[in-house]
Image: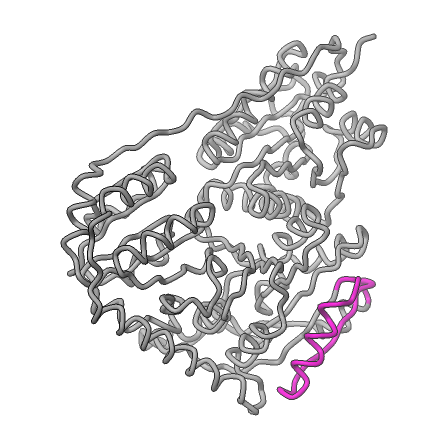
């Protein structure tokens, strides 16, 4: 018996392991919505906006490493997906983006809500295609999924309204092909020689380093290097590991970084590149050549990171670490922890952001996922969070405000057994706060912590640094606790530092969405 294209799409996605689809209904995808409602293998999350849907899919992909899937109708629906898709493209996150399109007879006409979606999505996806034949459905979706997985990129398929409702003969769904190992690009011997000649090495680890943390720790110990975890890899090692030097950002630059003579940049994003001293030698290891920091003139190694690290370990077998440098690393580690210990004793109000981060270090469970929006608070987190084994997800390249909450919701949908905490500023939260309704509707118990200073504080401080008069940096915000309650979530306002520990502890065990509106000070990070 024949099935529709919509039914075949869902059959294929389920066979390939897709569990969730995030999106908003609309005329061009009604047959797909009908098919979704008649099956149980894939759960559909009807989000408050298409932007929320694309960020939720991106959040799921960030924590699972598998393609997140988002869906929208034609025209403005497709356009509203762009921010989350661009975020995935710039950070190398696998996604499948499905959009409706006008009927094939209306393509390239002045029809309502028509525009050339392939032109829109081409710069921000690894692949964008228009499905024009029902019999091509499975093959086209298979190509898109394999491209998304193999190249860690979002892929887009638009489907005309008449095609999505067309009959498509039932067929076996072929399995996805495993991506071929990328091998190694670069001069491994030059990298070994560069590292082996240095006495004061430092390793900076980014998101792409997470799967290889054991080999990287082994390599760091072999060459006597200190480790600086980038924000996207904050939980790569417990904060008590004695060779950790703390985070790197506007609020903290580890002193030993400026004394080093070699930096191993392993999977770090461009945000960290600007803090690397110009005089040091750099060996950069990453999965993709497009991530190379050419301005640093590195010795580049790209491709199969596990193989690269194994080759480096073999080549550096006889390296003798500098004991004096190792002693300095341990002294700096102890000094950093002592500095952070003082943050927990702060009693000021409004509450300094570093006080909030200090309490979070003590309260958050080891298996927590921390979704971080964009704003000045993230620099305080980078400076002061002492990780256990938590997973941090953050936009490293696109840095769009408003992504934190839907990131967290997608992570919670994908990992229902883990605590998910969202860190956001008041400015970022108001951009996607409607997704609280999604959290309540689908019982996604995330904890949302708002650093509320009623300003775009990062912009204010940067204008001041450039001797500009701050303008346009004030935000108009509602009572976030009341807003949360109106949406059916728990809402608590926190304006006294002595309230923090008890309220945060309670929030972590509530089985419903919680918004903590924390009134914070304008304290400026030291390097802004």
Residue 453 lies in what quarter of the image?
A: bottom right
Q: 84 or 249, which is in the foreground?
A: 249
Q: Nearer the viewer, residue 326 or 16?
A: 326
What is the image's colouring? one colour
The answer to if 512 sits in the magenta stretch is: yes
Q: Quadrant of the N terminus?
A: top right
What residue do we see at 32% from left, 56% from top? 220
Q: How many marks?
A: 0
Is 292 rendered above or below residue 42? below
Q: Quadrant of residue 462?
A: bottom left
Extreme bottom residue here?
347
Residue found farthest to the right: 38
Question: Percent from the top left, x then y, of residue 437?
Answer: 77, 56
Q: Which residues are magenta?
A: 486-513
Residue 515 counted in the magenta span = no
Q: What residue appears at the point 75 percent right and 52 percent down from the top-left corner?
A: 438
Observer-nearest of 332 and 163: 332
Task: Please indicate whether residue 458 sits to the left or right of residue 170 in the image.
Answer: left
Give the quarter of the image for residue 459. bottom left
In the foreground, 123 or 178: 178
Quarter of the figure with the C terminus = bottom left
In the rendered image, the vertical position of residue 433 relative to residue 332, given as above or below = above
Query: What x and y, as percent, mark residue 92?
Result: 46, 41
Residue at the spot 75% in from the left edge and 13% down from the top edge: 166
Residue 404's spot in the image, x, y percent? Answer: 59, 58
- Residue occupying image coordinates x 31% and y 45%: 285
Q: Does residue 39 sit above or below 485 in this rendering?
A: above
Q: Position of residue 513 (x, y in %)?
A: 75, 62
């Amino acid at each position: 018996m024949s099935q529709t294209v919509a039914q075949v799409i869902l059959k294929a996605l389920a066979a390939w392991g897709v569990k969730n689809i995030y999106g908003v209904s609309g005329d061009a995808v009604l047959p797909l919505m009908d098919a979704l409602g008649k099956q149980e293998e894939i759960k559909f999350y009807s989000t408050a906006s298409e932007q929320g849907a694309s960020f939720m899919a991106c959040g799921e992909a960030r924590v699972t490493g598998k393609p997140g899937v988002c869906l929208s109708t034609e025209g403005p629906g497709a356009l509203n997906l762009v921010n989350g898709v661009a975020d995935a493209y710039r950070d190398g996150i696998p996604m499948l983006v499905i959009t409706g399109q006008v009927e094939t007879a209306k393509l390239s006409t002045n029809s309502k809500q028509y525009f050339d979606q392939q032109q829109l999505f081409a710069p921000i996806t690894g692949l964008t295609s228009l499905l024009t034949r029902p019999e091509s459905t499975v093959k086209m979706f298979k190509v898109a999924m394999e491209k998304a997985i193999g190249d860690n990129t979002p892929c887009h398929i638009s489907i005309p309204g008449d095609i999505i409702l067309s009959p498509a003969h039932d067929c076996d769904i072929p399995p996805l092909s495993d991506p071929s190992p990328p091998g190694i690009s670069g001069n491994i011997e030059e990298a070994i020689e560069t590292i082996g000649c240095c006495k004061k090495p430092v390793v900076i680890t980014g998101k792409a380093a997470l799967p290889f943390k054991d080999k990287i720790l082994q390599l760091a110990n072999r060459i006597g290097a200190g480790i600086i975890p980038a924000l996207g890899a904050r939980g790569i090692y417990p904060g008590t590991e004695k060779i950790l030097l703390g985070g790197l950002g506007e609020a903290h630059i580890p002193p030993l970084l400026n004394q080093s003579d070699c930096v191993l940049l392993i999977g770090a994003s461009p945000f960290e590149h600007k803090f690397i001293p110009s005089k040091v030698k750099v060996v950069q290891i990453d999965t993709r050549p497009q991530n190379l920091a050419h301005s640093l003139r590195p010795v580049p190694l790209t491709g199969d990171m596990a193989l690269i690290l194994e080759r480096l370990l073999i080549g550096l077998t006889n390296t003798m670490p500098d004991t004096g440098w190792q002693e300095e690393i341990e002294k700096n580690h102890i000094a950093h922890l002592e500095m952070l210990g003082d943050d927990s004793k702060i009693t000021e109000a409004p509450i300094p952001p570093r006080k909030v981060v200090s309490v979070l270090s003590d309260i958050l469970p080891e298996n927590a996922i921390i979704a971080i929006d964009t704003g000045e608070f993230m620099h305080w987190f980078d400076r002061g969070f002492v990780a256990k084994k938590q997973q941090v997800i953050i936009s490293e390249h696109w840095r769009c405000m408003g992504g934190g909450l839907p990131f967290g919701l997608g992570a919670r949908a994908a990992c229902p057994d883990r605590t998910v905490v969202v860190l956001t500023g008041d400015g970022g939260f108001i951009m996607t706060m409607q997704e609280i309704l999604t959290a309540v509707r689908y019982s996604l118990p995330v904890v949302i912590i708002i650093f509320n200073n009623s300003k775009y504080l990062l912009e204010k401080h940067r204008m001041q640094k450039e001797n500009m008069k701050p303008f346009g940096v004030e935000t108009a915000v509602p009572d976030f606790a009341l807003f949360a309650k109106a949406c059916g979530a728990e809402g608590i306002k926190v304006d006294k530092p002595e309230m923090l520990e008890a309220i945060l502890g309670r929030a972590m065990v509530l089985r419903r969405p919680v918004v903590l509106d924390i009134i914070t000070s304008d304290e400026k990070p030291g390097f802004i």
